[in-house]
């Protein structure tokens, strides 16, 4: 049971340390909407979402007022649309019509993002999968709230390099389709390895086929809380450092558990998981980079950064799993460059490079996230970066992801502006040596044999 003492204990965190519930995400299965008639499919999708999510935003607002806990976003995730639209959609344009329907439904119920414009192609692509992936640039350019993801690899199946090559082309095409907005469309497109079925965080959220007809997942974030707690143990040993992170993560997760339980009961929808991910914002004091620097780094990117991040990620998870019976999603530390002022400062100071960020993804919660690169970067180079990150996830049996933004018309030394939670980002240099021949090979990289792993 969660008591009001625990709630009141977090008041200081909320008022002074940027603690919030980052998102309540209502997962909605669209499998029962499948129809061979495209118009009928769109009608069913719109009707189901607007019915089930009718009270999502107002319920979140009621919980905010009653408990004094900020709930920043109310969002929806749906079944991967490549599965839902397979019977009706014969072309990429047909899938775009579904994207527009999802966008209208999201607008109707008042959520800021709806995720699940997705395809799961870790082993191979169906024609439906390929059509959806090819529709992504148009879909993201013509909608406001749609988030898209493609899972191109897994530890069990290997990496679908045909899909990796295609995704590099799609990222570049999406950048060009939204060039008038600093290629903003790419900020809503994630390429995954080992994508979880229950992730409440955008842009990678979708409702897996193993999930219920509807489910409430909550994402909690508290980088500022962890930073403040660590200020009290400066100069102490690693044991005290780890204990402080664990205890803080426990308290933050309890807030998420409270909100999840309340939302589940009020909406009449089963509770799924709490995702405790230290997801930063551009606000000063709400930074994962600042936590790492509080641990003892002069700047993020300095030697020791990967070790400090590994410590942080592990202790956050250890504290979280003690606070809730159902911790899931991604749970750990995010390192999105544009959404973290400390990361932005580190890039500008020259301490943080793309290669160092890649090393950090071996131990963090996800991967290369919200990184702006020169608009002239080739599709093959983007595919190569994706392939590298997918390999890290596949071999290490963890979720990894890539959200790169090749900002058309901009180069190193310039800045891309995305606004809101997406923030802004300095354009980072990319290795200019080519990988076209490697990316041009067909087929997939086989799954690793972990019994031989040393």
Image (cartoon, rainbow, N blue to C red):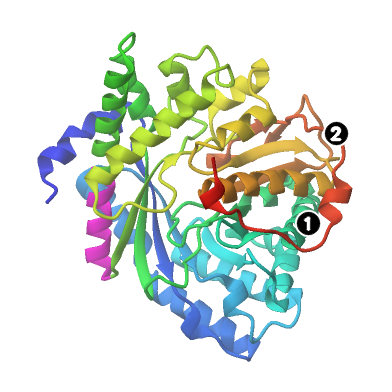
Mark positioned earlier in the residue sequence (1 or 2) = 1
Q: Is residue 310 left or right of residue 183?
A: left
| Residue 252 in view of the camera | no
Q: Is residue 265 magenta?
A: yes
What crowding class fits label 2: few (fewer than 14 Cα within 10 Å), some (14-19), or many (20 or more)?
few
Q: Residue 296's image quarter?
A: top left
Q: Nearer the viewer, residue 344 or 195?
A: 195
Q: Nearer the viewer, residue 102 or 356?
A: 356
Magenta stretch, main secondary structure class: helix
The reply to whether discs 1 and 2 touch (Cβ–Cβ < 8 Å) is no
Q: Is residue 295 left or right of residue 447?
A: left
> What residue is drawn where x is 34% and y is 62%?
216
Q: Position of residue 269 (x, y in %)?
A: 29, 69
What crowding class fits label 1: few (fewer than 14 Cα within 10 Å), some (14-19), or many (20 or more)?
many
Quadrant for the C terminus in the image = top right
Q: Residue under label 2, please give it.
A: 432
Magenta-highlighted residues: 254-268
Q: Nearer the viewer, residue 243 or 345?
A: 243
- Please tell me whether residue 416 is drawn above or below residue 212 in the rendered image: above
| SS state under label 1 | helix
| SS state under label 2 | loop
Q: Residue 39's image quarter?
A: bottom right
Marker disc for residue 165: 1
> What residue is drawn where x is 66% and y is 37%?
371
Q: Is residue 225 left or right of residue 444?
A: left
Q: Position of residue 110 (x, y in %)?
A: 46, 61
Q: Nearer the viewer, residue 193 or 341?
A: 193
């Amino acid at each position: 049971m969660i008591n009001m003492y625990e709630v009141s204990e977090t008041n200081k965190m909320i008022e002074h340390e940027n603690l919030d519930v980052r998102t309540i995400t209502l997962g909605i299965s669209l499998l029962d909407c499948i129809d061979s008639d495209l118009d009928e499919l769109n009608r069913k999708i719109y009707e189901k979402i607007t019915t089930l999510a009718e009270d999502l935003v107002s319920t979140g607002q009621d919980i905010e007022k009653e408990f004094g806990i900020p709930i920043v976003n109310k969002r929806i995730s749906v079944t991967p649309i490549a599965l839902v639209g397979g019977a009706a959609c014969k072309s990429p344009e047909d899938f775009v019509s579904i994207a527009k329907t999802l966008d209208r439904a999201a607008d109707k119920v008042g959520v800021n993002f709806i995720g699940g414009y997705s395809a799961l192609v870790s082993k191979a692509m169906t024609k439906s999968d390929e059509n959806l992936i090819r529709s992504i640039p148009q879909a993201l350019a013509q909608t406001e709230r749609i988030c898209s993801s493609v899972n191109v690899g897994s530890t069990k199946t290997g990496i679908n390099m045909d899909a990796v090559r295609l995704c590099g082309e799609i990222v570049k095409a999406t950048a060009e389709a939204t060039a008038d907005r600093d290629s903003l469309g790419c900020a809503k497109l994630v390429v995954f390895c080992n994508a979880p079925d229950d992730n409440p965080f955008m842009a990678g959220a979708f409702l897996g086929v193993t999930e219920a007809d509807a489910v409430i997942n909550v994402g909690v974030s508290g980088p500022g809380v962890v930073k403040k707690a660590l200020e009290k143990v400066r100069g102490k040993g690693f044991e005290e450092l780890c204990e402080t992170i664990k205890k803080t993560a426990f308290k933050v997760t309890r807030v998420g558990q409270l909100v999840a339980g309340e939302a589940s009961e009020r909406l009449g929808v089963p509770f799924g998981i709490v995702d405790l991910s230290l997801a930063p914002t551009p606000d000063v004091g709400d930074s994962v980079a600042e936590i790492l620097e509080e641990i003892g780094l002069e700047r993020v990117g300095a030697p020791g950064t990967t070790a400090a991040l590994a410590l942080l990620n592990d202790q956050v998870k250890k504290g979280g799993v003690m606070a809730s019976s159902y911790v899931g999603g991604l749970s750990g530390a995010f390192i999105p460059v544009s959404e973290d002022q400390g990361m932005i400062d580190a890039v500008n100071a020259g301490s943080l490079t793309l290669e160092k960020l890649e090393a950090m993804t071996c131990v963090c919660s996800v991967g290369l996230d919200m990184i702006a690169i020169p608009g002239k970067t080739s599709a093959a180079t983007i595919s190569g970066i994706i392939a590298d990150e997918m390999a890290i996830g596949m071999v290490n049996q963890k979720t990894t992801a890539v959200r790169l933004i090749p900002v058309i018309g901009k180069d190193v030394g310039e800045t891309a502006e995305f606004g809101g939670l997406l923030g802004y980002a300095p354009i980072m240099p990319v290795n200019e040596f080519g990988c076209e021949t490697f990316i041009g090979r067909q087929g997939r990289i086989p799954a690793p044999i972990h019994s031989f792993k040393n």
